[in-house]
Image: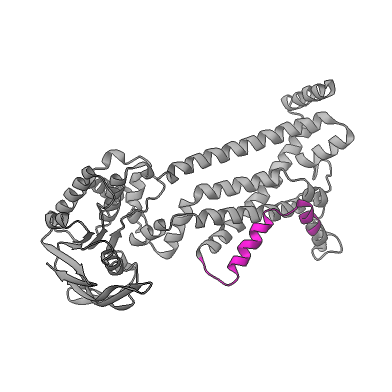
């Protein structure tokens, strides 16, 4: 199992201190939800954890069976981040979901089966041959989740997955997260500003307060 | 008016009877322009990718030069290539002047800035979120670049088609470096210029109709490509 530890993370933008000596350890598998008001630094923290952004100071370390895992392409391929605005490739839903497998050299039946399973998991099987850019916002968010799930990440980061979707899709996405929680197959770290939603979805509730992570 | 109509009727007859001379001129035009476009694409695409993905000194200046060269006057290119290939020029020993190869060189110079500059615009126009999505899914830097190029494919195809339109309609440069030699370097545009001068409007009109049809075909293809790309850009 892959774990993650952040130590004394500092980050500021244009003189505004966002994260202040922020430390936390995600050592247990499960669903973690990071909450807090807009602009408190949730997404910044997530992007730093997902190795998309560098902190000003501090350290991110990934570990497996007590050993530190070196930060390289193979580690990057064990984690993934779904952004609030999903970058949809201008091709079919199927090819979008298959992307992570294709770049890993997975082809043929194996790829097909994995993509079909992921599409079924998020309820998009019937749209597999459609151009992904014709999907609604909610469906696009589900596509982003399927695209991440298909590569079976050991740690999955979801940044505000329901921020720009309607109520129906919010419910569908919440059900997907609850299914992931039930399956216990990976660590899922989610940000949301909706406290009620956070409480509905997890026992590992975290709050970003004054630039630091507080466990609730 | 009757002269125009008669010439038009004679031109249609030439087309319908697949006149041998006419066919030879069309095939040479397509061959010269096709090779020039292929060479321009082979050089222009990697160059546009380099400009799109890499940071290096004077990159901005290079982009500005390319943009300026999109409007390069063909006769100036013709003169430049002529001076290069003429017997007293630096490449005179190759004896390429007044050959289809010289015409290909001139047309490549004309198409290259268009293909490169428009492809570069297409690449940098891809939403940065695509690059980020690709990275978060574990792509290597070269896989990220290929993904961005794939996303820019409709823009790149438009760039190639625009380059083809430019070279097919060009007359000044190829007239200078090709010499308009019958059966050897005579292409559609140079024939139209020559036959009009001679008052032989039938052949000129026939070629004009074909050139316009090719232009219509190119524009229709461009429209279809842009329409297809629009589906993707709608969200």
x then y, percent, for residue B182: 83, 41
Q: Position of residue A77 (x, y in %)?
A: 30, 64
**Residue B96 occupies quadrant:** bottom right
Can you give x and y, in whole percent of width and height, for residue B40 in the image? 64, 54
Q: Range of the magenta residues?
A: B54-80
Magenta stretch secondary structure, dominant: helix
Residue furthest right as drawn:
B198
Q: Nearer the viewer, residue B163 or A207?
A: A207
Task: Quadrant for the C terminus of chain B, please.
Answer: top left
Q: Position of residue A40 (x, y in %)?
A: 26, 66
* Residue drawn at 81 percent across, 47 percent down: B175
> Residue B138: in sight, yes or no?
no
Name the quarter where the N terminus of chain B is drawn.
top right
In the image, residue A65 above or below residue B201? below
Q: Nearer the viewer, residue B178 or B74?
A: B74
Left or right position of B66 against B46: right
The reply, left or right, for residue A205 in relation to residue B127 is left
Q: Is residue B62 magenta?
A: yes
């Amino acid at each position: 199992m892959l774990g993650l530890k952040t130590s004394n993370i500092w980050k500021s933008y244009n003189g505004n201190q966002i994260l202040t000596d922020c430390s936390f350890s995600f050592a247990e598998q499960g669903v973690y939800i990071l909450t807090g008001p807009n602009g408190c630094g949730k997404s910044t923290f997530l992007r730093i954890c997902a190795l998309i952004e560098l902190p000003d100071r501090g350290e991110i370390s990934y570990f497996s069976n007590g050993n530190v895992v070196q930060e390289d392409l193979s580690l990057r391929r064990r984690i993934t981040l779904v952004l609030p605005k999903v970058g949809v490739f201008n091709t079919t839903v199927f090819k979008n979901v298959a992307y992570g497998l294709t770049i890993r050299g997975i082809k043929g039946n194996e790829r097909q089966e994995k993509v079909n399973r992921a599409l079924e998991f998020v309820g998009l099987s019937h749209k597999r041959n459609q151009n992904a850019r014709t999907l609604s916002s909610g469906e696009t968010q589900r596509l982003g989740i399927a695209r991440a799930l298909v590569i079976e990440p050991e740690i999955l980061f979801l940044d505000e997955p329901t921020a720009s979707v309607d109520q129906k899709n919010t419910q569908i996405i919440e059900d997907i997260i609850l299914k992931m929680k039930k399956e216990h197959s990976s660590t899922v770290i989610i940000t949301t500003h909706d406290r009620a939603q956070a409480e509905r979805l997890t026992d590992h509730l975290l709050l970003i307060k004054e630039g630091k992570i507080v466990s609730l | 008016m009757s002269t125009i109509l008669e010439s038009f009727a004679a031109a249609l007859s030439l087309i319908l009877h697949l006149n041998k001379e006419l066919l030879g001129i069309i095939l040479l035009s397509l061959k010269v322009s096709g090779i020039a476009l292929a060479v321009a694409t082979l050089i222009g695409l990697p160059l546009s990718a380099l400009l799109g993905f890499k940071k290096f000194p004077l990159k901005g200046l290079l982009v500005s030069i390319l943009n300026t060269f999109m409007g390069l006057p063909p006769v100036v290119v013709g003169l430049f290539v002529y001076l290069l290939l003429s017997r007293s020029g630096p490449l005179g020993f190759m004896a390429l002047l007044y050959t289809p190869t010289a015409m290909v060189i001139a047309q490549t110079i004309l198409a290259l800035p268009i293909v490169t500059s428009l492809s570069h615009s297409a690449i940098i126009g891809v939403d940065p979120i695509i690059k980020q999505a690709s990275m978060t899914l574990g792509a290597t830097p070269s896989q990220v670049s290929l993904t961005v190029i794939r996303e820019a494919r409709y823009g790149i195809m438009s760039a190639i088609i625009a380059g083809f339109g430019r070279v097919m309609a060009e007359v000044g440069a190829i007239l200078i470096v090709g010499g308009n030699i019958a059966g050897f370097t005579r292409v559609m545009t140079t024939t139209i210029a020559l036959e009009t001068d001679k008052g032989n409007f039938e052949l000129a009109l026939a070629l004009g109709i074909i050139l316009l049809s090719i232009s219509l075909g190119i524009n229709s293809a461009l429209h279809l490509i842009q329409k297809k790309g629009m589906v993707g850009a709608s969200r």
